[in-house]
Image (tube, grey):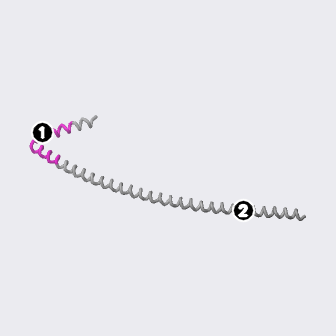
Amino acid sequence: MSIADGEARMRDWTDKATAERLEKDVAAVKNDIAALTDQITDALNTFANATGKQARRGYKQARENMDSTLDDMSERGSAMMGAAQDAYGSIEETLEDAITQRPLATVGIALGIGFLIGAVWRR
């Protein structure tokens, strides 16, 4: 029995050594996976922060572009209103001069325009 006991002990010792080695290997793999998970988490956080900063920059730039566009539109609108007021004043002066210099022609034109409006209105 001593040989059988020795063989059994040898198998137990080999199995224990193998089991311990497997346990160490599994623990090492778990640690590697945990470290990899931490690295992936850090990379994702960095990417999310960079994306957030880029989105904020894009928003600020779009807002600045919109503000400058609105300012340009306001300036152009003011310039158009000024031009329209100048044109109105010029037309008013021209009509006033035409009425005072040629009153009969003005009455004839007014009657002609009235006739055209009446003719169009009837159709």
Q: Which residues fall within the magenta stretch?
A: 90-115
Q: What residue sits 73% from the left and 64% below the top? A: 20
Q: In the rendered structure, does residue 106 fall within the stretch colored magenta?
A: yes
Number of residues whose C-alpha sits closer than 10 Å to that of mark 1, classed few (under 14), some (14–19) or many (20 or more): few
Q: What residue sits 63% from the left and 61% below the top? A: 32
Foreground: 88 or 123? 88
Task: Say which mark, if any, is on residue 81.
Answer: none
For marks 2 and 1, the one nearer the N-term is 2
Residue 77 is situated, as x and y percent measured from the top left of the image, at 27, 52
Residue marked by disc 2 = 21
Foreground: 109 or 65? 65
- Badge 2 element: helix
Vertical side of 29 occupied by 98: above or below: above
Q: What residue sits 10% from the left and 41% below the top? A: 102
Residue marked by disc 1 = 105
Number of residues whose C-alpha sits closer than 10 Å to that of mark 2, classed few (under 14), some (14–19) or many (20 or more): few
Q: What residue sits 68% from the left and 63% below the top? A: 27
